[in-house]
């Protein structure tokens, strides 16, 4: 395996390929994404333990979604049983994914520990225990500083784990080396990755604007509670589809950034 340097325009191409692949089999890919959202929702019932479990399971969930995307992208005809085949594909890397998940959880908890030293645990309780965000929390001493420090420290953690699940599964790279190679790939191809992320910011903004315009149009007609229900449904559906397409599109940076040796 060796690193491949890609042009900056690849960032937009990855988004297009992710969307194209998703709409080739939207039922299977959206079902896979919703399945994982259900798992995360169930885990959130157990505030601290569920949050930690979600962190550990995240690399495996990400890889399963990428595997499903790969199946759809590489098949000329509709693929039956995408979820089952993706889960079967990932099953062989369960142990390595568990190690990777534990490493991710440890990294995230370390960042939360640093934030605890800054604001006394306000942000950590919001992120790990699920306490509601209140004006009192926002105004707590050190809260904004802890938020910025957490955001800055989370960036290299996210980049290191971005490709790590795919590298250890498809390229047989050990977890620690997978983290290193993922980080290097993101840094060496930073223009493409920056354009990829900026493109997604644009997509989310466009969806929010579309929902806002829809609300204004429906509001001019009238309807009160019915309009609110329609808007909430449209907004939720749009965000779910966007989340699924984002995870689909995350497979293509891996495919283009690494070449089998």
Image: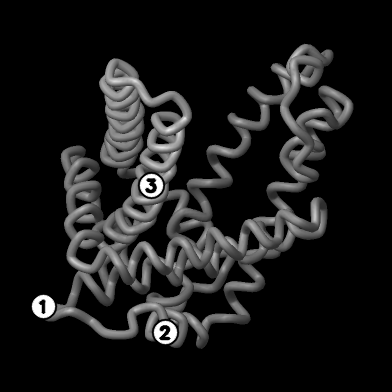
- Pick whichever, 170 or 259, lies toward us: 170
Residue in view at x 42 percent, y 42 percent: 233
Left or right placement of residue 139 versus residue 190 in this view: right
Give the structural element (helix, strand or loop) at label 2: helix
Element carrying mark 3:
helix
- Seen at 31% across and 65% down, the residue is 2
Question: Would you identify the image quadrant in which residue 146 lies?
Answer: top right
Residue at 45% across, 78% down? 172
Q: Residue furthest left?
A: 76
Q: Earlier in the sequence, mark 3 or mark 2?
A: 2
Residue placed under numbered mark 1 in the picture: 76
Q: Crowding near pointer 3: few (<14 within 10 Å), some, many (20+)? A: few
Q: Is residue 200 left or right of residue 76?
A: right
Residue at image point 82% right, 15% down: 140
Whether residue 90 appears in this view of the structure is yes
Residue 60 place in picture, x, y as percent: 54, 69
Tell me where residue 116 appears, x and y as whole percent: 84, 32
Q: Which residue is mark 2?
A: 84
List the residue tagged with mark 3.
Answer: 237
x, y percentage for residue 165?
A: 48, 66
- Pointers 3 and 2 in contact (C-beta within 8 Å): no
In space, the residues marked 3 and 1 are separated at their CA atoms by 27 Å
Q: Tell me if I can see residue 194 in this picture.
A: no
How many residues crowd mark 1 within 10 Å: few (<14), some (14–19), many (20+)? few
- Which label's residue is closer to the chain start, 1 or 2? 1
C-alpha span from label 1 to label 2: 19 Å
């Amino acid at each position: 395996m060796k690193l491949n340097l890609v042009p900056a325009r690849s960032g937009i191409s990855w988004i297009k390929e992710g969307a194209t692949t998703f709409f080739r089999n939207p039922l299977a890919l959206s079902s896979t994404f919703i399945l994982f959202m259900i798992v995360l929702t169930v885990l959130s019932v157990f505030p601290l333990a569920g949050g930690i479990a979600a962190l550990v399971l995240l690399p495996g969930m990400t890889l399963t979604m990428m595997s499903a995307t790969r199946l759809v992208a590489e098949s000329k005809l509709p693929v039956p049983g995408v979820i089952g085949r993706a889960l079967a594909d990932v099953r062989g890397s369960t142990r390595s994914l568990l190690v990777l998940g534990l490493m991710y959880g440890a990294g995230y908890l370390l960042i939360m520990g640093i934030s605890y030293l800054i604001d006394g645990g306000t942000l950590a309780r919001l992120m790990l225990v699920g306490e509601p965000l209140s004006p009192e929390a926002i105004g707590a001493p050190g809260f904004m500083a802890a938020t910025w420090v957490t955001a800055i420290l989370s960036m290299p953690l996210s980049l290191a784990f971005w490709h790590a699940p795919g590298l250890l599964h498809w390229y047989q790279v050990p977890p620690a080396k997978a983290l290193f190679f993922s980080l290097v790939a993101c840094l060496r191809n930073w223009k493409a990755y920056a354009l990829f992320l900026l493109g997604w910011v644009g997509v989310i903004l466009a969806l929010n604007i579309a929902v806002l315009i829809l609300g204004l149009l429906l509001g001019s007609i009238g309807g009160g509670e019915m309009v609110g229900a329609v808007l909430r449904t449209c907004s939720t559906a749009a965000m779910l589809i966007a989340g699924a397409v984002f995870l689909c599109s995350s497979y293509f940076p891996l495919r283009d950034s690494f070449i089998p040796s």
